[in-house]
Each structure stands twice: as C-alpha cells, then as structure tokens.
Image (cartoon, helix red, strand yellow):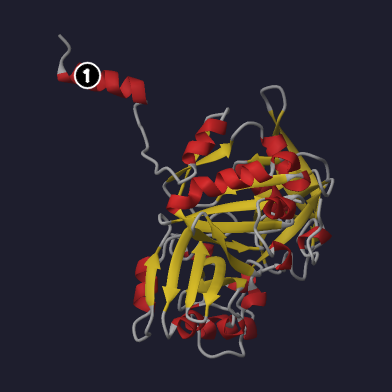
Amino acid sequence: MDTAADKVALRRAAQGHFSAWRIDTPFQPRLAELSRTDDWYSWAGYRAPHSLRDEELEYFAIRSQAALFDISPMTKYRVEGPDAEAFLNRLTLRDVTKLNPGRVHYTAWCDDEGFVLDDGTLFRLSAERFRLCCQERHLPWLLDSAVGFQVSIDEETEQVAGLALQGPTSFAVLREAGFAGIEKLKVFDLAELDHEGGKVVISRTGFTGDLGYELFVERALALSLWDRLVKAGELRGIRAIGYTALNRARTEAGLIVANADFVTSEHAIRANRLRMPDEIGLGFMVDATKGHFNGRRAILEARTRGKLRHVLVGLEIEGNVPAEHAIVYHKKHKEIGLVSAALWSPMAKKNIAIASLERPFGDTISDDLWVEIYAMRELQYQKLMKRAKVVQRPFIKLDRRTANPPADF
C-alpha cells in the first residue's frame, strides 16, 4: 500500500517537483486551443505565451498582416472623481490638463527623488474618469498619494480584458468587424463602441511602432470580442502571437520596458541602478511649466547641476549576431554600459540594440564604441568585438502608423 510520502512523490512527479500556479486570462481558452509550442511564462502572475506556433511567423504577422496579442495581464487602474485630473497631474510627468476626453498619452511617474517608478498609458475616458495602464502594481502608493484629493482608485486588472491588434491590416479587420467610425481615430484617440450589449474601448495605440489598436472590454465579453475579431480577420491574415514576436517589434520601434531596459525605483536594490526620466529617454515628458509633481525639484536640479549619470541610446552594430546583454566598451577596454535589448532587424536590415551607457559616453562622446558578443559556434563560445555607433530611435519609422485615415491594406 502506498504511504503518504509515496503519494506526494507520485503527485510531484506528475506535476513537476516545483509547480508555479498562474492565473488564466479571460482569453486563455482561445490561446490554449492555438498553442502548439506550449511555451508559457508568468506575466504579473498570469499565464502568457512566449509563442503559440512559430516566432518568425508571429513577428511577420505584425509587419505584414494583423497580429492579436493578449494584454490582459497589464496592470490597469480606474481613477475617477472631481479631483481625478488634479491628482494625476500631481502624480505624473506630463500635463494632464492638456489631455482631452477621448485621448491617450504615454507618461511616467517618479518618487520624490525624481527616480522613475514606472511608465505607462493614461486614458481619459471622460472629464472625471481615467484608466492608467502600466507594468507594475502601485495601488498602495497610489492610495497614499491620493490623500486630500476627492478621487477613487481601484485596480481593475482582473475585471477588464485587453487585446492589442497590430499590423497593416488591423484597421481593415476592425472595420470588417463592424466597429463604425473606427476610421476617424487618429493616433492616441480612443472611442467607446458597442459590443454584445456592452461597451468596448478602442484606442489607436500599441507597442509595435506599426498601425495598431488596443481594445478593452469587461471580462464576460472577452471571448465574444476575440471571436468577432478572428472572424473579421480571416481574409486579412489575422494571427494570434506571443511575447517574443512583440518584443522584436517593440525593439525595432525603440520602445522600452520597465525592469528590462531600466530598473524601477521600487525594485532597485542598488542605488546606482535608479534612473531619472532624462536617463532613459523620457525627458520629453517632463513638463516644467505645470505646477508641482512628484520628483519635480530633483529632476530639475539634476538638469541644472549636471547630475545626470546615464543615457539610454540606440545602437547599430556591425555584423549580424545580436548583442543581447552585451557589455559596451569605449576603445575596447573601458566598460561603459550594457545592452538591454538587441536583434537583427528584418525591417531595418541592421543589427540593432538598446543600451544604457554612463555619461558622457553616448551623450557627448559617441566615437570608438564596441560591444563584446559571445556567439555559440559548434558547442564553443567565440568572443566577438564589434563596432557600434549611436543612432536615433526608433530604428524603423512606418508612415502607416500615423496615416489619417489609416491605410486600407
């Protein structure tokens, strides 16, 4: 007869010695049906696919068709009330009073020392109702920051499902799906449209640098929205994708990811890992003309006193071996930074990378830069020292992303 220990051993053998419990998103039934790779990872505790079938086909769906990506795990907060605008203006870097209802803007927020806590998108759904989407969870900090404001803040990550529909045929798919007036949306516009007796918020936003949209709907309507889009996209080459393809596209677009390209101030253990907006390419967000906001004094002081220590840059690297996580050198011997994202870009036809460098390198000194790449060649690593040059991001710029009205591919 099996002992209790034997039963535990059998259960562990069946499940794997260590098993991580992950939350299913509202779209998990559809993703599970499509998955052939069975390659899942944890995104904020949710089960998410690295890929579903083929990483290359999924990437090219973004650039030549329409790609459907589940963004439900993205943290979402509902912020509403008479002081919602004033609260968010106090909290974030950009001037929220300039954000009209029906618009979205990309923003970031800092701690009192001016170090970035996170970046994300702020949706103004109405005069007093906002949705803040980001990578990390901040509810206790948001609630503490809201003391004295007439505002309510609730996390709605589980209640609101999200999809990104990206690629040149994305507009045509939405039109075919019957979303009337979708052609009127300009970049960073949003609209609230009917779906199955409820509402879906559709914004002309995305994380690919391509023509694209994001759709948010209550959890109960998630699968019907997925099915509506897939049916409408059958003749437009719609394809569900995983994170690996999305990460390639966002790197080509020069877009950054929290705790990948920079360490947020709540996660940084070492003081020299903290970053100010100007050190990660977000200085354009800082509106010094508006009233007080978190970190304002520290950010402006760092600018005036020359205390900025780092700079985030785009690099073009010789050869075709991606320089992911490579060390960057000046004159082959002085270590000056690290690559955080890299790939051979099929669109740019170049070896590209995003890197964080120590100033003045990448700022006033940008010559004689090298990256140290280790390439696996027949079970042996080969060290490659390749030249790099600083270039502007994005690495590719597609006219269709901003075309008005959107092109009908």
Q: Position of residue 153 (x, y in %)?
A: 38, 72
Hey, what amino acid is under mark 1? Lys
Classify residue 280 as left or right of residue 210: left
Q: Mark 1 highlights which residue?
A: 7
Locate residue 6 relative to residue 31 in the image: left or right. Answer: left
Residue positioned 46% across, 62% down in the render: 76
Crowding at label 1, few (<14), some or many (≥20) Cα neighbours within 10 Å? few
Most foreground residue, 256 or 361:
256
The residue lying at 57 percent from left, 52 percent from top is 163
Can see residue 325? no
Residue found at the very far top of the displayed protein? 1
Above or below, 243 against 96 in this view is above
Give the left or right position of residue 350, taking residue 222 as reference: right
Q: Is residue 105 visible?
A: yes
Quarter assignment of residue 18:
top left
Please give the name of the residue rendered at 64% of the width and 71% of the height, measured from the top-left corner.
282
Quadrant housing the N terminus: top left
Q: Position of residue 53 (x, y in %)?
A: 63, 31
